[in-house]
Image: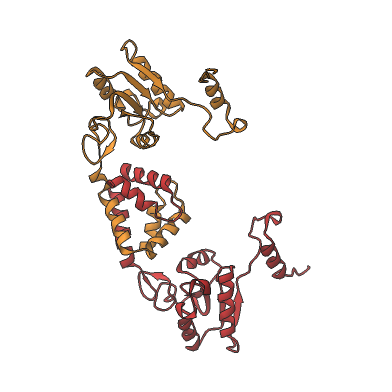
Chain colours: A orange, B red
Amino acid sequence: MNTLESLIANLSRLPGIGRKSAARMAYFLLDSDKSFNESLADQIQYLKERIVSCSICGNYTEDDPCPICSDNRRDHSVICVVEQAQDVHPIMSTNEYQGVFHVLQGVLSPLDGVGPEDLTINKLMKRIKAGGIVELILATNPTVEGDTTALYLVNMLKGSGIKVSRLASGIPVGGDLEYADKLTLARSLRGRTEISLP
Amino acid sequence: MNTLESLIANLSRLPGIGRKSAARMAYFLLDSDKSFNESLADQIQYLKERIVSCSICGNYTEDDPCPICSDNRRDHSVICVVEQAQDVHPIMSTNEYQGVFHVLQGVLSPLDGVGPEDLTINKLMKRIKAGGIVELILATNPTVEGDTTALYLVNMLKGSGIKVSRLASGIPVGGDLEYADKLTLARSLRGRTEISLP
């Protein structure tokens, strides 16, 4: 296999990239500046060395603890529990959340052999035992595994006196009732919010 | 901008890759084998050094002349003229074509200031003058620029005694008459092929 073919083969291993997109990317790289290719190559080569998991929350970071955990202006009494480090960015970009995070590094999935000991649940419990936590927002995905994991955490936190909440699930903004699936619609009914009349 | 952000910014400069796909790719690279990242980085870094243009046809190649030009089992009396080096692969993969190629490195586009001297037309004429060419297949895209370029070549080749053809343009296989645009339909009518009755 020649250089171009093996580059295309590697690029098409990236998520969401088929052979045609990979070929398009490879030809783009052939035509682009040498400096762009070198900077991209450097970033890919040293990515895993430069980025580590935050020792407190498990988020991806270059400095340990991560900028979120070491930011004193944030509310360290509220922890948002997410499945993966990539879930931190979308929540941060809403500008709605002022607390800190905890990355579970996965979800409970008995079928795949993922139990509580495979996640960072123990670490989360230690953070809670250390005190100062008022609220836990369970932001696992609204899937069977995400719901199971949230339920498991709720059971563990019984009697702890901590306020526990779950992200609202329902019809997305701009969505259409007509095309919403039954489960989503059922959840959005169950989670309906009261509107106070003026 | 941190490491992850700048990688995502660079990845989203690739064709067809938006910010979300770039982020997905970056997280994939964070989770993937170190060896995969290193091989991909190496391929990107040295791509432009390892791959050159074939001095005969202009195709991308590691060895000059390219494997197609140096293959004696191919028919060197037929040249397929394409716009870009990336057009060679799709034609080769049809297994229908046994000749060689000529890459124009672009199309005539007066609006963008691309004239005949910016393309490899002189080189093509030299190949033809050197003799032994029987047929020229004009495989520029069926666009205004591609058609103009084909017409320009046809005019240049007048009286040369070389058989000149153009790739058929029409409804794609699996396509639908109902959704075909007027121009495509008009071309497929003009280029209709006779069926000999048994």
Residue B134 locus on image (x, y percent):
56, 83
Residue A97 locus on image (x, y percent):
36, 29
In this view, the residue in front, A194 or A142, is: A194
Residue B70 locus on image (x, y percent):
41, 76
- Quarter of the image where the C terminus of chain A is located: top right
Q: Residue furthest top?
A: A159
Vertical comparison of A82 with B125: above or below: above
Vertical comparison of A82 with A3: above or below: above
Query: In which quadrant of the rendered view does residue A81 lie?
Result: top left
Q: How many marks?
A: 0
In this view, the residue in front, B73 or A129, is: A129
Is residue A175 rendered to the left or right of residue B123?
right
Vertical comparison of B36 with A174: above or below: below
Is residue A145 rendered to the left or right of residue B192?
left
In this view, the residue in front, A100 or B96, is: A100
Is residue B93 rendered to the left or right of residue A111?
right
Residue A140 locus on image (x, y percent):
40, 27
Vertical comparison of B138 with A6: above or below: below
Query: In which quadrant of the rendered view does residue B157 lie?
Result: bottom right
**Is any atom of residue A68 visible in this view?**
yes
In this view, the residue in front, A197 or B165, is: A197
Query: In which quadrant of the rendered view does residue A7 lie?
Result: bottom left
- Quarter of the image where the N terminus of chain A is located: bottom left
Q: Residue at x 67, y 64 (%)?
A: B183
